[in-house]
Image (spheres, helix red, strand yellow):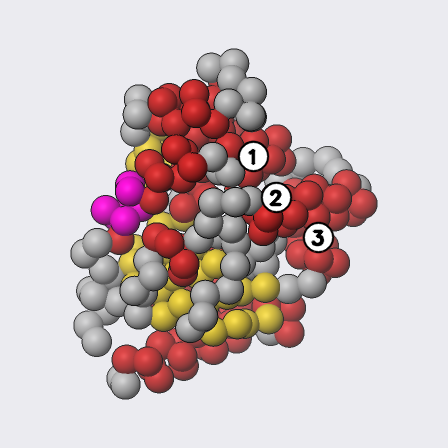
Amino acid sequence: MEATRVVIAIDGPAGAGKSTVSKMLSQQLGLRYLDTGAMYRCLAYKALQAGLRTDQGVEAAVLLDSIDIEFGIGEPQPVFINGEEVTSDIRTPEIGEAASALSQYTPVRQKMVERQQKLVANGGVILEGRDVTTVVAPNATLKVYLTASLEERSRRRLGEFSAKGVAGSFQDVRTQIQNRDHRDINRDDSPLSVADDAVIVESAEHTPQEVCDIIVRHLQRVTGA
Ligand code: DC
């Protein structure tokens, strides 16, 4: 299959390494990279700025209509809301929490999924999130569920935060991730789950490059390339 048509969808809990692996594969395979979590984070950022609470999902969905989200090219991938760069503003634990809370609301999800499906429609993309294998791209060429233990994911997240100078203890990060998992897995609308035909990859057992190699082997298997 031509790289231009391929769609690789990767779901998994917070801190499983989805972003690292998706970005590496996007480079390696020449695919566009779509970070669907960043879109929920953008909405959360604007919602908090507008004074909304994180249980105001209906109001947040209305707000979304006035929010244009764009991605640039680079590492970290630049993110823009209505032309304003918010790349690092949306990466705080507070915004992650708010994104998780607002993402529970069906009006928010419907609008996000609609946008994301448009971005995926022409193929040639690797996308990651919490519902991309089940809802956004159920016909993806390859579906992957990337996971690791809570301990391992907490260790990684703590490392990412300290590299960015964000303070926090292991216990705090562990609790945050546990809460986020709980919410993402138990929400009523399209909860994080393993799609029937997804390949499950345990990221803690491998380096990021090894995870990419495993995914490429699965891609070759399903495309017969
Ligand atoms: O991947 P992330 O940490 O940037 O995602 C932030 C939150 O956004 C996540 O906890 C749940 C929500 N999300 C979602 O509901 N569906 C997606 N496809 C991606 C993210």
The residue labelled by disc 2 is 183
Callout 1: few (<14), some (14-19), or many (20+) C-alpha neighbours within 10 Å?
A: many
Q: Main secondary structure of the magenta part?
A: helix
Mark 2 lies within 8 Å of ligand 1 (Cβ measured): yes
Q: Nearer the viewer, mark 1 or mark 3?
A: 1
Task: Name the N-terminal-most of marks 2 and 3.
Answer: 3
- Disc on the earlier residue, 1 or 3: 1
Residue in view at x 31 percent, y 65 percent: 140
Q: Which corner quadrant holds the N terminus? A: bottom left
Q: Which residues are magenta?
A: 114-119
**In percent of the image, x 61 and y 44: which residue is there?**
183
Q: Residue tagged by mark 1?
A: 101
Spatial CA distance of label 2 from label 3 is 16 Å
Q: Residues within 10 Å of mark 2 (few under 14, many from 20)?
A: some
What's the residue at 29%, 41% (across, down)?
115
Real-space CA distance between mark 2 and mark 1, rounded to the nearest whole angstrom? 7 Å
Where is residue 129? Give x, y as percent: 46, 52
* Rendering coords of residue 54 (x, y %): 56, 26
Q: Is residue 120 left or right of residue 59?
A: left
Q: Nearer the viewer, residue 56 or 47?
A: 56
